[in-house]
Amino acid sequence: MNINLLDYLSINRVLFTTASTKEDVIDELIKISRDDGKVEDVKRFKQALLKRESIMSTGIGYGVAIPHVKLPRIEEFFITVGIHKRGVNWDSLDCKPVYLIFLIAGPEKKQEKYLRILAQLTTVIKKPERRQQFIELSTKYEVFEQFSHALK
């Protein structure tokens, strides 16, 4: 099963945010996901994301957070990208601010596909210079282009 991250991304789901809290960033990510037709039940979706955050922060360190949720009403995986140029407190494992947020959502019973998406995303963002490049981008198109370039 080959995964191409571009299949799960959309220019419509790229967010440049200045929100001051993790929950506000999550609200904005959910809103643009809903506006793009990916989230129907906003309340349930947010509850599931916050429940996951309460178990352990999805701030994995290195300025990156990967909030994720799998719900039965989501038929296909999608990724919504958030960029916070100043950084936001995410209670990250390294106690540092988060600049890049990758919300991953998908169907409940597709763990292997989720892990493959996560593995490819991790490959894209593992280099510090690439993470910095993402932070410095200023348009949705540049973000999409950066992913395209990174996946070659």
Image (cartoon, rainbow, N blue to C red):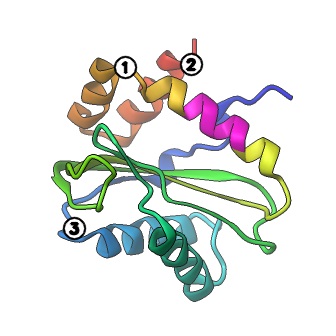
Whole-percent x and y of residue 98?
27, 50
Q: Residue at x 34, y 75 (%)?
A: 23
Q: Residue at x 46, y 69 (%)?
A: 53
Which quadrant does the N terminus fall into?
Answer: top right
Q: Are marks 3 and 1 in contact (CB under 8 Å)?
A: no
Residue 18 versus residue 26 in the image, above or below: above
Name the front one of labels 2 and 1. 1
Q: Which residue is mark 1?
A: 127
- Amino acid marked by disc 2: Leu
Task: Give the label on residue 84, or none.
Answer: none
Majority secondary structure of magenta residues: helix
Q: Is residue 110 left or right of residue 103?
A: right
How much space separates mark 3 and mark 1, taking CA atoms? 26 Å
Q: Which residues are magenta?
A: 115-121
- Amino acid marked by disc 3: Ala
Q: Which residue is mark 3?
A: 19
Q: Is residue 71 left or right of residue 28?
A: right
Which quadrant does the C terminus fall into?
Answer: top right
Q: Which residue is mark 2?
A: 151
How much space separates mark 2 and mark 1, taking CA atoms? 13 Å
Residue 12 versus residue 113 in the image, above or below: below
Q: Residue at x 70, y 41 (%)?
A: 115
Mark 1 crowdedness (10 Å alpha carbons): few <14, some 14-19, many ≥20: few
Q: Earlier in the sequence, mark 2 or mark 1?
A: 1
Tag 1, which secondary structure? Answer: loop
Whole-percent x and y of residue 118?
61, 39
Tag 3, which secondary structure? Answer: loop
Whole-percent x and y of residue 52?
54, 70
128 magenta-colored? no
